[in-house]
Image (cartoon, grey):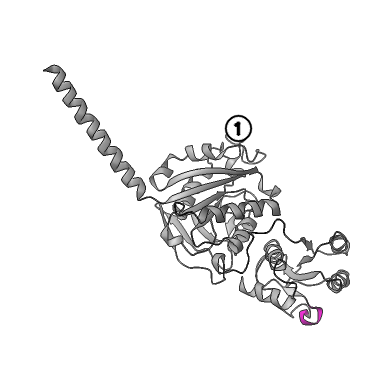
Amino acid sequence: MLYQKTARFLWVLFACLALLSLNAQAQNAKLPNVMILATGGTIAGTGATSTTTVGYTAAKVGVEALIKAVPELSKVANVSGEQVFQIASESMTNEHWLTLAKRVNALLAQPNVDGIVITHGTDTLEETAYFLNLVVKSKKPVVLVGSMRPSTAISADGPINLYNAVVLAGSPDAIGKGVLVALNDQINGARDVTKTNTVTADTFKATELGMLGYIVGGKAHFYRASTRKHTVDTEFDVGSLSALPAVDVAYSYANVGTTAVDAFVAQGDVGIVHAGTGDGSLPARTKPALVAARKKGVIIVRSSRVGQGIVARNGEANDDELDFVVSDTLNPQKARILLMLALTKTHDTKEIQRMFYTY
């Protein structure tokens, strides 16, 4: 009799456990599937002490450890991870971008991937985000995230940023919004956001054109969207590319000469972005070198080191006469990205100017 009661109890217990397991699986099936692609950066960094927030070592913690550090992720998404790179983002290269973009497109083409989060160092995060904004071929959310403090710091911002990024990548409201950046509880668009402070947690801002929304209470709240074309609506495709055209940025300042421009031309650049003062002004000593470069076939884009505002065509220079292109509101580092991709399609300056007004 005791044996029968024990057997009956165990059967009921196993049945209850099986039912709980089925319920858990049913609940997980309702959650979005988010892939985390890790590339290194401060979010994966470690410091000598818990108060080390500068002078730490970036790109030390692997993706699995990042995920395990935020167990709350399992409540908002079915999360899996992949280590793509393990670098500090100041070392990001064109080759890294092409590898990352191809992997993102391959994953987003899979029906069981609803969104992607990319952990990234903050130094070049805005550049990677804008590159992907131009070449990702899916409306599914792609969210870049980083942190300003290493994982070992007392007030590390990486865990909450990662949680918010996964929430955003799994949100239906983020579909079709382009590549996004999620730090400091804020949602920013890849085109307009930039790093504005060397150390503070609120460094990423779209100062003039504004952020897109907030992530509060485990939910994404959008208030605006970019009007510029992106992702599936661009004309760029990196699928067959093994390299990007050589483009560099020549920075302007008082007493600047022609050293940078001459060196870039000599090494075979096909495009140069001039980060001019003010409204993209051309210094008297540098202008002849830029004009000579254009006559040799190098595409010249006038941008501004100011960081805000439109570089007006035929404003500080007669762009029509010089056959130059202006960057619109893109900062020099993002103008370089668009110029590289534009040069994979055409060397016609009128067509390239159209692209700068489109993207």
Q: Is residue 158 left or right of residue 122?
A: left
Residue 178 percent coordinates (x, y): 53, 63
Q: In the image, what residue occupies the spot 55% across and 43% down?
A: 82
Q: In the image, what residue occupies the spot 52% across and 36% down?
A: 65
Image quarter (top left, top right, bottom left or bottom right) of the C terminus: bottom right
Q: 128 or 307, which lies in front?
A: 128
Q: Is residue 256 visible?
A: no
Instruction: Name the quadrant containing residue 209.
Output: bottom right
Q: In the image, what residue occupies the spot 74% across and 75% down?
A: 348
Residue 31 percent coordinates (x, y): 38, 50
Q: How many marks?
A: 1
Q: 52 or 333, which lies in front?
A: 333
Q: Is residue 97 visible?
A: yes
Residue farthest toward the front in the current orientation of the protein: 240
Mark 1 is on which residue type?
Answer: Thr
Instruction: Name the quadrant containing residue 294.
Output: bottom right
Q: Is residue 165 above or below residue 51?
A: below
Residue farthest toward the left in the current orientation of the protein: 1
Mark 1 crowd level (few <14, some 14–19, many ≥20, 10 Å Cα):
few
Q: Main secondary structure of the magenta part?
A: helix
Q: Is residue 14 left or right of residue 164?
A: left
Image quarter (top left, top right, bottom left or bottom right) of the N terminus: top left
Q: Which residue is mark 1?
A: 49
Q: Residue 225: say if magenta.
A: no
For the record, the magenta segment spans 319-323
Q: Is residue 285 left or right of residue 32?
A: right
Helix, strand or loop status at disc 1 = loop
Instruction: Name the quadrant containing residue 208.
Output: bottom right
Residue 62 percent coordinates (x, y): 57, 38
